Amino acid sequence: MRYISTRGLTPPLSFKDAVMMGLASDGGLLLPETIPTLSQDEIAALSDLPYPELAFKIIARFVSDIPETTLKSLIDQSYASFNHKEVTPVVKQDGTYILELFHGPTLAFKDIALQLLGNLFSYLLAERGETMNILGATSGDTGSAAIAGVRGKENINIFILHPHQRVSPIQELQMTTVTDPNVFNLAIRGTFDDGQRIVKEVFGDLDFKKEFSLGAINSINWARVLAQIVYYFFAYAQVKRQTGCDSIYFSVPTGNFGDIFAGYLAKRMGLPIRKLILATNENNILSRFVRDGDYSVGSVVETLSPSMDIQVASNFERYLYYLYEGNSMKVREALEGFQESGSLSFSAAERAKVHEDFVAAAANRQETITTIRDMYQKTGYILDPHTAVGVHVGRNLAKSDAPLVCLATAHPAKFGDAVHDAIATTPPQPESLHGIEMREKRCELIDADTEKIKKYIKQHAY
Ligand SMILES: *Cc1c(COP(=O)(O)O)cnc(C)c1O
């Protein structure tokens, strides 16, 4: 399997090179040259497999340059760190299936991709005799999941910038209590936007980037999307076993179009998904796109589901490539137009094509709170606010012709304040958080100044 860029100006790459490249050299995003398809019999044959074995069967279809036994052991290692034996269990609550994606080390679904990406980086760097210094800015979830993915690994350092005292206490502790010598937490005196700007500026210094082999961890790496395809197949198998259904709805709370894009690929591979239900909070550019063909940037508003407070969805370009039927020139033109005007428009035929796969809506603050409260009162089950957005929208849009599976993207204890507002109860803490505030911490407070950050990296990098 080879990988090509959405913008069409990068020569085809192997899987290993695609993982190491991250963002394509022409500025586009990498995609497999073809999407492998599975027959319904092949899909049925996957249905009794434990998660890591299913993951191997799916992922191996996209990887032809890593020996099977090695790939298998990288995958096994990645999911051994989860604290549930089924890795991503499906539970039924009040008639809705909840796919719990939050049993990884940092209690959010990003662990599913970043545990695997960390192991892939480590294996590829060792094989190539290279080192890497990962640099990223986080508003909370991605940073801790990325740190958990590479902590203690050889040949790799990670520098994560977070805005000092502007991430939730749990998110901060999940980062700063990782004291492995290859992890560098930098609390900047500034905002998340400052952090993103600094990271951009550091990557923009190409000599510096080369000298220190800077690597990125944002959601554009193909391996992250790939790892996320697996749980759509896993959930389908669980629900089919329970209901005998022939197809299902998936409702996906979305910000960057990453998670739901993995579902789109699962559908293209042959998984019988009735519709993908795209759920946003008040930052609704993606739901406006699906409903009305209106992809125009608004300003970011703060919500109860901060990991979806995004206006420009980095993975959207991958979907555009398929919507434009692989016409990369059209992708380039569209993106140039978007850069200039902040909006994209779509033909009636394109909109009809979108509706073959997606329906969408947004949930506001009150709807999110009501959904958490209703579910708790009926069942005692606690939804996190991101998951609640998906449950609200999913229940409104799924018809009764197939079961509904809602993706639960974070453990409620991670967003305890919002949950407390809804149900006046604090969610029980999972074991991994017990005593976290007592643990040793390692974090450097530093000015939001690109030169100072570069100096720090220089002093501590490989
Ligand atoms: C990152 C994140 C999301 C959004 O995921 P996308 O891939 O951007 O769609 C949703 N919920 C939580 C808890 C997250 O951390």
Image (tube, grey):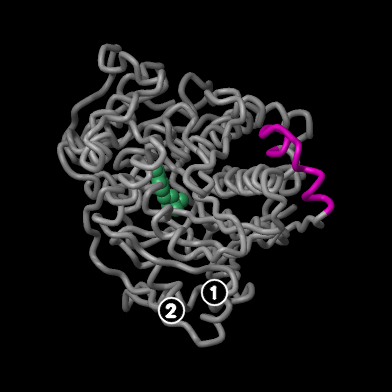
Mark 1 element type = helix
Amino acid type at mark 1: Val
Residue nearest the viewer, comparing 31 with 453: 31
Magenta portion: prevailing SS class:
helix
Name the kind of residue labelled 2 in the image.
Answer: Gly
Pointer 2: residues within 10 angstroms few (<14), some, or many (20+)?
Answer: many
In the picture as drawn, the residue positioned furthest to the bottom comes out as 348
2 and 1 marks in contact (CB < 8 Å)? yes
Give the side of residue 238 with respect to residue 121, left or right: right
Q: Earlier in the sequence, mark 2 or mark 1?
A: 2
Q: CA distance from mark 2 to mark 1?
A: 9 Å
Residue in the picture at 49% in, 69% down? 359
Number of the label disc, if any, that sits on residue 251? none
Residue 47 lies within the magenta run: yes
- Residue that mark 2 sits on: 293
Relative to 260, residue 70 above or below: above
| Label drawn at residue 354 | 1
Residue reaching furthest right?
A: 41
Residue 453 in the magenta stretch? The answer is no
Q: What residue span does the magenta drawing correspond to? A: 41-55
Q: Residues within 10 Å of mark 1 (few under 14, many from 20)?
A: some
* Direction from residue 300 to residue 223 in the image, left or right: right
Residue 270 at x, y percent in the picture? 73, 59
Q: Nearer the viewer, residue 3 or 419?
A: 419
Say whether residue 31 is visible: no
- Report whether the residue tagged 2 is closer than 8 Å to ligand 1: no
Above/below status of 69 relative to 346: above
Q: Is residue 133 toward the left or the right of residue 71 in the image?
A: left
Question: Where residue 151 appears, x then y in whole percent?
Answer: 46, 23
What is the quadrant of the C terminus in the image? top left
